[in-house]
Structures are given as structure tokens and as C-alpha cells.
Amino acid sequence: MKKLGVGIVGVGEMGRRHAENIRRLVPEARLVAVADAAADRGRQVAADLEIENSYPSLEEMLARKDIDAVVIATPDKFHANAIAAAAGAGKDILCEKPLATSRGDAQAALRAVARAGVRLQIGFMRRFDPAYMAAMKRIEAGDIGEPVLFKSLGRDKDIPPIEAYQSNVNGMLFYNNTIHDFDLARWLMGDEVTEVQAYTTVSIRPQLAMYGDVVASSVNLKFAGGAIGNVESNVQAIYGYDVRSEIVGSKGAIFVGSVEKVPTAFLSASGSSHILADHFLTRFADAYLAEVRDFVDNMLHDRPPRVSGREGMKALEIAIAAEDSHLQGGAPRRVRDQEVELLGAAGQSVN
């Protein structure tokens, strides 16, 4: 049986999980190598997973002929360049969200993918989460009628160290966190977001303003078909890792994620461990594994990825509009309606 040769660039927290999954839980794939600018970390991950090859740069790893596909788990601002490099080497790609942190970088990455004729999947793993997949099946079956209201929230438990902002290698809140919910909004509602209005705060950590970021946000959404929505994000909720979504339709509603069904629930750092996960890798462990299994299966059978570069671009445009609204003090901003019409050598739409 042919196995997909995989290399992973960026083996911090997220990349290491992808490496562990591919090495131990995806028999159709072979983890060939890892690469990380922190060479010691790369060597340690390779040793822990009992593989021979680690590299201090993506370019060195890409020279290997036995790598068919690359998983990109570097910090956000390196995604676009890594996509272009992997595409130029003829490798299929699974890239963590976001596609990029600017429209220009994203377009350049997609052009590189199109020119090379490779396939690109964006890591919106919530689409592979069993709970969200079950919700989508009910929506597609018409069980809630026509969707009219969307609500989603994402709250991280741990306070990010200030060094995470000082390094300036990750996108701000909308690109690093909220973009998952922007993708869910499009997917679950089956419609495009056309306008956003973003309210933000640094009230409990004002020093973040000097790095162009925020602690929390609330983003109102308008959809092309007339539905409305709201997405809330918080990077230091303290009490737990809390992700929930609601879709209300003309005949019913679906709720994904919940807390205890009591009239009042008090959650604190010491009192919610039995209710909520403590980390995204815990809550979405099954989703990350299902995502990479699906990617490997599609690449081996020459099928397009389930979550394409186009989906990454659409979510990115919502994040860009949200940032624009934030910078304009909460003024409503239109979401740019650009279909990615990039054609590869074979005349196929970009992945």
C-alpha cells in the first residue's frame, strides 16, 4: 500500500500534535521529516517520534523527493511564504489557519498554488469535529428550517504571555482566534458574510494596544441572504476553554457546546474543570485527527481537499473587514466580495 510521505514545518504545540497524529494514528501516511527554525526543538520532536530527519529550515526539508505533502504549522505571518515554497517544490499542502495575515500575501500564496497545480487545504478543523458535523447534517436536512441567526463564541483559558505579542509573528485576535468562527459562520449558515461591525477592548490588559491587538471582541455579522449573527472572542477567560455555537432557524435551533443545565452557573479558574476543556488540543483532539486523516486520504486518492484555499480566502476577508472596523472605532465595514479566479496550468480552479 502506498503511503503519503509527509513533512511538517513548525513543531511547536500545534505542529507537534500533527506530527504525533501522523506518526502514530494515520497508517496511510509516513512522517518523513520535521523542520523548525528552532533546530533543537526539531531534533527533539524527531527523536521523540523516532524518525531520522529534522531540518532547521523548510527549504532544506522540501529538497527531499520522498515528501509528497507538507503540513504548515509555523506562526501565522510565515504561512503565505511557506505555502508558496511548498507549492514551488510540487508538494500538496495542509496549512494551519489563517491562510495569511494580509490580502496581498494570501493572493500571492494562492497564485503559487495555482501555478504549481498542487492542492491546498486550510486547517479549519472545527468542520471535522463530530459535534459540528452532526449540527451541519441537521441543518442540511432542513431540521431547523431556514437559518436566520448565528451566534458563536471562543474563549481561551490561559493568558498569553506578553512575549507572544512582542514577537509580532502571529496575527491579531481576528486572524488567530476569531477566524475559526468566521469560517463556521459561512459553513453552517450556507451563506456569505457581507458586512461586519467589530467592537473590541483591552480594558483588562491595556498594554496590548501598543502591539495592535486586543483582549476581547464582539463582531456583528450580516449575511447576503438576510440572516444576522454575532461572534465573540476572548483570549483570557481564565475559567476554561469555552467554544459554543448556536444556529437558529425558522423551525428550530441547534446548539453546539454547553455548560451545565442549571439556572445559574458560576465558572472560575478553580471551579469549571469538570464542565469545560482546559485547552484547544483537548477539546478538538478528535477534530485534528479526523482533519489530517481526511487530508491524507484525499491526497492519496487524487481528490480535492475538503476545505480549500478559497475557503481560507473567504474567512480571511471577513477578518480583514473586522480589523478595519476595529480601527475605525466600530464602524460597519463591507466584506470584500472577491471570488478567487486563479487558474493552474491544467485549467483547474485553485484549491
Image (cartoon, rainbow, N blue to C red):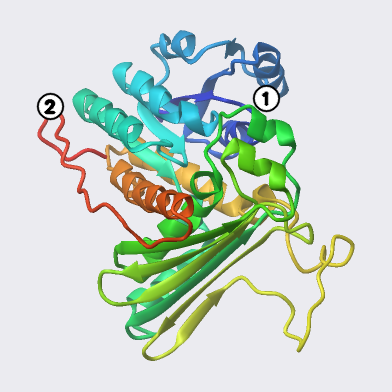
Can residue 79 be seen?
yes
Spatial distance from mark 2 to mark 1, Cα to Cα? 38 Å
Mark 1 is surrounded, within 10 Å at the Cα level, by few (under 14), some (14 to 19) or many (20 or more) other residues, namely some
Q: Amino acid at mark 2?
A: Ala
Residue 203 at x, y = what percent?
A: 70, 56
Residue at horizontal 41%, vertical 9%? 63
Per the rendering, the mark at residue 200 is none
Residue 155, quarter of the rendered image: bottom right
Residue at horizontal 34%, vertical 23%? 84
Residue 310 at x, y = what percent?
A: 28, 45
Residue at horizontal 25%, vertical 74%? 225
Q: Nearer the viewer, residue 345 or 74?
A: 74
Q: Secondary structure at mark 2?
A: loop
Quarter of the image that includes the N terminus: top left
Residue 260, quarter of the rendered image: bottom right
Q: Which residue is mark 1?
A: 49
In the image, residue 155 sits, relative to residue 95, either above or below, namely below
Quarter of the image that includes the C terminus: top left
Can residue 128 be seen?
no
Per the rendering, the mark at residue 345 is 2
In the image, residue 19 sits, relative to residue 174, either above or below, namely above
Mark 2 is surrounded, within 10 Å at the Cα level, by few (under 14), some (14 to 19) or many (20 or more) other residues, namely few
Q: Residue furthest left?
A: 347
